[in-house]
């Protein structure tokens, strides 16, 4: 049973999300939070597997709350705006992905399962636009180590990394490169390790930001 904390400053939405989660036999609501501070407290108290996190909230916003809890639980951002710049900040803070608040119920439940398993979720409607928003810029000092790591990938790993950066799923990468899905998973695992990032969302962000310098 996966345990979820729902954090949103709108009570009706918290209740609606709770009903969607409780409708699945493998999911349960461990706690509710109306702001980021309550979310941090709920993680301390309940040790959930996943936190569904709104961003724009009083007291403590979802970005800072994510930064405080990302090392202890998975965070899935829910947002109304698919191009919300705050989403990018939340991903950098350690969130494992984001979905739109009007996503179908089953997509939301699947998103919880996916991030709980250590993978990443990006709203399909917004992935291409998110990548476009991260147009190459001059790398910062913080990016230099990541840039060296990307340049140190094997030729095949760089091909896989580029396709990850374009938002392709493992099956699509396998078809594009004419390799097995298992081989893609191995390459993705190696890429995550060499780049020192937690999931494919952060590969997308890194590649999109730095691809002009690779």
Image: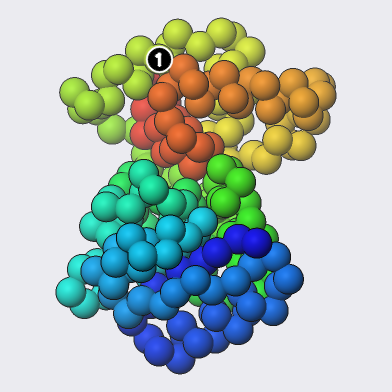
Q: Is residue 29 left or right of residue 172?
A: left
Dividing the picture into quadrants, the one containing residue 188 is: top right
Question: On the image, numbered disc 1 is attached to which residue?
Answer: 149
194 vs 102, nearest the viewer: 194
Residue at 22% x, 26% y is 142
Residue lying furthest bottom in this view?
12
Q: Is residue 11 above or below residue 49?
A: below
50 vs 81, nearest the viewer: 50
Q: What percent of the width, then of the height, locates residue 167?
A: 58, 41
Q: What percent of the width, then of the height, locates residue 166?
A: 56, 37
Q: Is residue 9 above or below residue 181?
A: below
Q: Is residue 205 left or right of residue 170?
A: left
**One can see residue 159 in this view:** no
Residue at 55% x, 80% y is 18
Q: What percent of the width, then of the height, locates residue 62?
A: 30, 64
**One can see residue 158 in this view:** yes
Q: Is residue 89 left or right of residue 151?
A: left
């Amino acid at each position: 049973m996966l345990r979820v904390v729902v954090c949103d400053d709108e009570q009706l939405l918290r209740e609606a999300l709770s009903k969607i989660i409780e409708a699945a036999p493998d999911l349960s609501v461990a706690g509710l939070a109306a702001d980021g501070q309550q979310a941090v407290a709920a993680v301390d108290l309940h040790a959930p597997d996943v936190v569904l996190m709104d961003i724009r909230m009083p007291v403590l916003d979802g970005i800072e709350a994510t930064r405080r809890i990302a090392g202890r639980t998975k965070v899935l951002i829910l947002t109304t705006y698919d191009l919300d710049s705050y989403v990018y900040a939340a991903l950098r803070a350690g969130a494992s992905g984001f979905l739109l608040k009007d996503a179908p119920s089953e997509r939301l439940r699947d998103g919880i399962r996916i991030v709980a398993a250590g993978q990443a979720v990006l709203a399909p409607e917004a992935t291409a636009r998110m990548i476009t928003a991260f147009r190459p810029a001059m790398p910062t000092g913080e990016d230099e180590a990541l840039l060296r790591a990307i340049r140190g990938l094997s030729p095949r790993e760089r091909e896989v990394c580029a396709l990850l950066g374009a938002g392709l799923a493992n099956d699509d990468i396998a078809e594009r490169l004419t390799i097995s899905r298992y081989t893609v998973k191995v390459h993705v695992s190696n890429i995550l390790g060499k780049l020192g990032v937690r999931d494919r969302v952060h590969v997308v962000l890194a590649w999109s930001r730095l691809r002009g310098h690779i």
